[in-house]
Image (spheres, grey):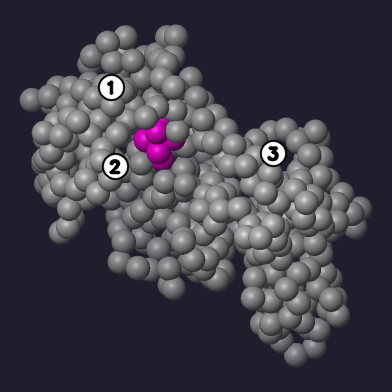
C-alpha cells in the first residue's frame, strides 16, 4: 500500500514542495501534518486489530478469552474512542506482537498465560469507559495484576494466579480469593499517584497495594503516562515485574518533562505538535530498568519512549524528538514496504560497534537526521552548546544515508523516495 500525501500539506522544513516528495518530505523532516499523523495512527491501530483478529481465531473457544471479547465489545459500543485508543496504544502493540510470535496453541490447547492477558486489556478499557463489569484477570506469579495504562495491584506474598476486577456503583475493586477488596483509584488531579491499600503488612489480609499509572499533562493538548508497571515496557521478549515509582522519582520526572516541554513549545513548536500527537508513554530508564541506554523505542510499541533521567531540558527535548521519529517511521512501515533486503544483510553503522541490518540503518538515518535538525534550530536560536551535537548527528545521519545509497537494492521504490527526501533535507543545510 502506498502512503498518500494530505490534500493540502504544508511545506516541509527542507524547503522543497511536498508535492514533489509526497508524504516522505514531511516525514523525513519529522513534522508530518495532522492528516498524515492521523493516517499513521490509524495504520498502527489497524495493524494491532488485525493481530487481534488472528489471535481470536486461535483462542475464541477459551471461555476466559470469550469473556474478555464480550467486555471489549461493550466498551466499543458504549465508548468507541476508548476502544480505539486502547488498540492504538503501545501496550497493546507490544502484547499482540508477543502473542503472535508465540503462534497458535499446540495441540488445540487454547489455555495459557498470554491469551489470558486479554482480560487485562478488557478490564482496563472498561474502567476507562466507566462501565459496570466483572471479569477474572491473571495475576502474574501470583503477585502482580497489571491493567495496561491504568495501574497494578501488587501483593507481597504469592497467592492465587487470578483475581476478579469489577466496577459497580460503589467503585472499582480487585478481589483476590480470601482477601478483602482492594479499591482502585486513578492518579490524582496533580498527576501524582494516589495509592490504595498497604503493601502486604500485618493485618492487611493480603489485600495488596494499588499503584496507578501517573498521567502527566504537559500542555493543553499533550499528556503522557509515566509507566514503570507494564510487563513489556522495555520491549520484551520476557515480561518484567512492575516497578512502582516512588513519589520523589515521579516528581523529578514531572520537573524534567515539563522543562523539556517548555523548550519544545517555545523554540520548536512544530515538533512539539508532532510529539503531542504521537507520544503516549514515557518509561523511565531508572532503578531496575536502568540498562545503559540513553533512550529507546520499540517497533511494536509506537508512541512509547524509554528515557534516561536527563536533567538538561534541551538534551531531554532532543531525546523526545529522536524517539518520536522512530515511532513515526515504525508506523509508516505499517503502510508502505520500504525494504526488501536479503536475510542477513548488514553494513557498518557509525553509532554501533557491530554491523547493523538495513532497517536499523534506515531508522538511524531518519532519527539522527531529525535530531540534527533540532540542534540546527538550537544553533540558529543562539544556543552555544548546539554546534557540537549538530555537527555530530548531521555526520552520523549522512554516513548512514551514504551506506544505504550504496545498497539501493535493499530498498523498495517507496523506500528510495524516503531516502531521497532525507538526502534532500540534508543537502538543504549546505
Above or below residue 46? Residue 111 is: below
Q: Outermost residue, front direction?
A: 107
Where residue 107 sits in the image (x, y, percent)?
A: 66, 60
Q: Main secondary structure of the magenta part?
A: helix
Say which mark, if any, is on residue 359: 2
Of labels 1 and 3, earlier in sequence is 3
Q: Is residue 372 left or right of residue 158?
A: left
Residue shown at 60% from the left, 53% from the top: 104
Q: Is residue 379 left or right of residue 305?
A: left
Say which mark, if any, is on residue 413: 1
| Label 2 neighbour load within 10 Å: few <14, some 14-19, many 20+ | some
Which of the pair 367/202 is nearer the observer?
367
Where residue 132 sits in the image (x, y, percent)?
A: 87, 49
Quadrant (top left/top right/bottom left/bottom right) for the N terminus: top left
Which of pointers 2 and 3 indicates the residue nearer the eye?
Answer: 2
Of labels 1 and 2, earlier in sequence is 2
Which of the pair 383/315 is nearer the observer?
315
Q: Outermost residue, left direction?
A: 430
Residue shown at 22% from the left, 50% from the top: 356
Where residue 62 sits in the image (x, y, percent)?
A: 77, 55
Of labels 2 and 3, earlier in sequence is 3
Residue shown at 69% from the left, 57% from the top: 108
Which of pointers 1 and 3 indicates the residue nearer the eye?
Answer: 1
Q: What residue is shown with label 3?
A: 82
Q: Which residues are magenta?
A: 327-333
Q: Is residue 11 left or right of residue 225?
A: left
| Label 3 neighbour load within 10 Å: few <14, some 14-19, many 20+ | some
Q: Secondary structure at mark 1?
A: helix
Amino acid at each position: 500500500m502506498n502512503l498518500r500525501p494530505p490534500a493540502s500539506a504544508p511545506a516541509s522544513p527542507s524547503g522543497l514542495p511536498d508535492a514533489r516528495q509526497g508524504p516522505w518530505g514531511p516525514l523525513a523532516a519529522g513534522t508530518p501534518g495532522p492528516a498524515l499523523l492521523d493516517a499513521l495512527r490509524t495504520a498502527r491501530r489497524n495493524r494491532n486489530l488485525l493481530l487481534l483478529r488472528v489471535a481470536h481465531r486461535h483462542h475464541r473457544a477459551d471461555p476466559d478469552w470469550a469473556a474478555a471479547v464480550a467486555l471489549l465489545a461493550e466498551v466499543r459500543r458504549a465508548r468507541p474512542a476508548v476502544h480505539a485508543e486502547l488498540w492504538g496504544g503501545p501496550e497493546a502493540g507490544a502484547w499482540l506482537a508477543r502473542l503472535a510470535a508465540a503462534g497458535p496453541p499446540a495441540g488445540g490447547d487454547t489455555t495459557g498465560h498470554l491469551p489470558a492477558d486479554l482480560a487485562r486489556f478488557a478490564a482496563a478499557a472498561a474502567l476507562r469507559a466507566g462501565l459496570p463489569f466483572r471479569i477474572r484477570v491473571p495475576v502474574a506469579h501470583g503477585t502482580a495484576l497489571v491493567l495496561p495504562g491504568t495501574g497494578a495491584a501488587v501483593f507481597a506474598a504469592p497467592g492465587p494466579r487470578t483475581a476478579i476486577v469489577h466496577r459497580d456503583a460503589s467503585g472499582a475493586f480487585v478481589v483476590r480469593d480470601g482477601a478483602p477488596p482492594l479499591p482502585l483509584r486513578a492518579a490524582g488531579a496533580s498527576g501524582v499517584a494516589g495509592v490504595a491499600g498497604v503493601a502486604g503488612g500485618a493485618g492487611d489480609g493480603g489485600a495488596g497495594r494499588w499503584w496507578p499509572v501517573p498521567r502527566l499533562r504537559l500542555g493543553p493538548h499533550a499528556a503522557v503516562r509515566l509507566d514503570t508497571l507494564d510487563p513489556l515496557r522495555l520491549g520484551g521478549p520476557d515480561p518484567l515485574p512492575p516497578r512502582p515509582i516512588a513519589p520523589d522519582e515521579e516528581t523529578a520526572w514531572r520537573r524534567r518533562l515539563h522543562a523539556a516541554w517548555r523548550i519544545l513549545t517555545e523554540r520548536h513548536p512544530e515538533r512539539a505538535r508532532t510529539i503531542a500527537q504521537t507520544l503516549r508513554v514515557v518509561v523511565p530508564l531508572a532503578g531496575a530498568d536502568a540498562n545503559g541506554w540513553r533512550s529507546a523505542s520499540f517497533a511494536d510499541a509506537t508512541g512509547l519512549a524509554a528515557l534516561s533521567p536527563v536533567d538538561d531540558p534541551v538534551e531531554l527535548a532532543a531525546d523526545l524528538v529522536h524517539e518520536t521519529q522512530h515511532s513515526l517511521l515504525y508506523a509508516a512501515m505499517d503502510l508502505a514496504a520500504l525494504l526488501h533486503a536479503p536475510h542477513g544483510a548488514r553494513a557498518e553503522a557509525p553509532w554501533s560497534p557491530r554491523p547493523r541490518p538495513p532497517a536499523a540503518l534506515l531508522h538511524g538515518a531518519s532519527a539522527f537526521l531529525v535530531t540534527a535538525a533540532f540542534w540546527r534550530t538550537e544553533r540558529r536560536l543562539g544556543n552555544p552548546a548546539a554546534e557540537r551535537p549538530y555537527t555530530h548527528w548531521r555526520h552520523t545521519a549522512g554516513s548512514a544515508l551514504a551506506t544505504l545509497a550504496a545498497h539501493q537494492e535493499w530498498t523498495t521504490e517507496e523506500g528510495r523516495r524516503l531516502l531521497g527526501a532525507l538526502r534532500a533535507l540534508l543537502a538543504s543545510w549546505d
